Image (cartoon, rainbow, N blue to C red):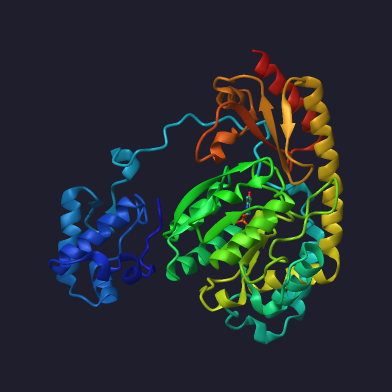
Amino acid sequence: MPESQTNLAWDVLLDLAVQGTGPQHEQLARALRSAIRDEVLPVGTALPPSRKLAADLSCSRWLVTQAYAQLVAEGYLAAQTGSATRVAWSPDRDGRRPTASRPPTPAARYDLTPGLPDLRAFPRRRWAEALRDTLATMPHTEFGVPARGGHPRLRAVLAEYLRRCRGALASADDITICSGVTEGMTQVSRALKAAGITTIAAEDPSWGRTRHAAASAGLAVQPIPVDEDGLRVDQLSGFRAVIVTPAHQFPTGTVLAPARRAALVEWARDVDGLILEDDYDAEFRYDRRPVGTLQGMDRAHTALFGSVSKTLSPALGIGWYLLPPVWTDLVRAGSAPPVADQLALASYIESGGYDRQLRAVRLRYRARRDALVAALAEHLPDARISGVAAGLHLLLHLDGVTENLVRRAADAGLRLTDLAVYEVSPSEGSTLVIGYGNLADNAVVPAVTLLAALLRR
Ligand SMILES: Cc1ncc(COP(=O)(O)O)c(C=O)c1O
């Protein structure tokens, strides 16, 4: 049974101010009721004695006893002589809140969903060293209020990294540190809205979370098709902003063709618009050097977004964006990741550790992709693979319609993702987006064999 909660900040918890109108004891009852319904106060929680709560809330004791009595009458609370009044109701037990009644999905033996880098490869030792050294040596002044928009040292280190590795035109002043691409897109989308841009174009198919980031900022998101040369730039007329993944389109795996890159930059200049360039996994190209950023072609009309979600781990929650100078003042940065983490990343990059890690995992992913392609060729010879040799996923086009494949596979312990998940306008046919980033090397062949067996059934 939960302990007595008499030391809680009840005035904050109950937030009387937002409870609306009516007599004060009704407001308090309403606040308690919703705290119980939302399970902020779970069943069994002891409420403070009425005298104590009255003192905390600066109100009369009578008001509190009235509110308690009301909730006892409604069954939310139970009062016992000589003991604390306790929460007596739980939403689930009462069936008022629908409980998730789906049968638990069995833990997948093989997970081919895209998204994660190899979590086993996370450089624990190096990261721990960077973090420990940072904490041991950072001046005490760094423990003060963090700089908005990120620590200047990480911004400078990232500017150098983006110039060197991504061909970006970056200076520390133009960089904002945030928790990831999604968060960065949300902040920039808000600024677009504030600047009077109401609609944004986005690739179709694309990652739903970046589309959602723009929509959550109040922008109307319009899908623009993608073909084998990437985004159909010819369909951008009427727009002033677009979200695009030019180095490695997600999820089709194409690279924006040179003529399209030029056309996209020309479009942005013509309409004085903004290209939101999502550079999410550009470091991983296996057949040649990665193409440079569009931002490097036109810094005045491109916002570049990146994060360590694919290179190290999404759990670190560190990302950045690089804005054209005219936009820098319009975007209101949110809170950046913890200062020690930012400084640890800065020193990890400065020491060369980040580059070494990227070289090591690039080899690992390349070998894994080769093994996957070979296994698919052997066990599913009629299926077609598409997407350049890059990133952490590929597309697998299956022959014919595959009824309930994703569900049947899940039942058999294999997690799959249908391309339709990323499509605004679902296409015909059966295509899977196969992620191999976090697939153990020894799981490649068994996972493909299982998929082939399911398709034969
Ligand atoms: C297309 C795309 N963009 C960006 C990201 C990274 O987003 P974040 O930095 O918010 O983790 C992902 C991660 O899966 C992605 O698939």
Residue 174 falls in image quadrant: bottom right
Whether residue 317 can be seen here = no
The answer to whether 375 is drawn above or below residue 226 in the figure is: above
Residue 314 falls in image quadrant: bottom right
The answer to whether 107 is drawn above or below residue 220 in the figure is: above
The answer to whether 223 is drawn above or below residue 188 in the figure is: above
Residue 429 horizontal side relative to residue 46, left or right: right
Residue 52 falls in image quadrant: bottom left
Residue at (48% x, 69% y) in the render: 191
* Residue 164 pos. (x, y %): 81, 68
* Residue 19 pos. (x, y %): 23, 65
* Residue 111 pos. (x, y %): 67, 35
Residue at (73% x, 77% y) in the render: 156
User: Which of the two residues, 350 or 322, is positioned nearer the viewer here?
Assistant: 322
Name the quarter where the C terminus is drawn. Answer: top right
* Residue 279 pos. (x, y %): 68, 57
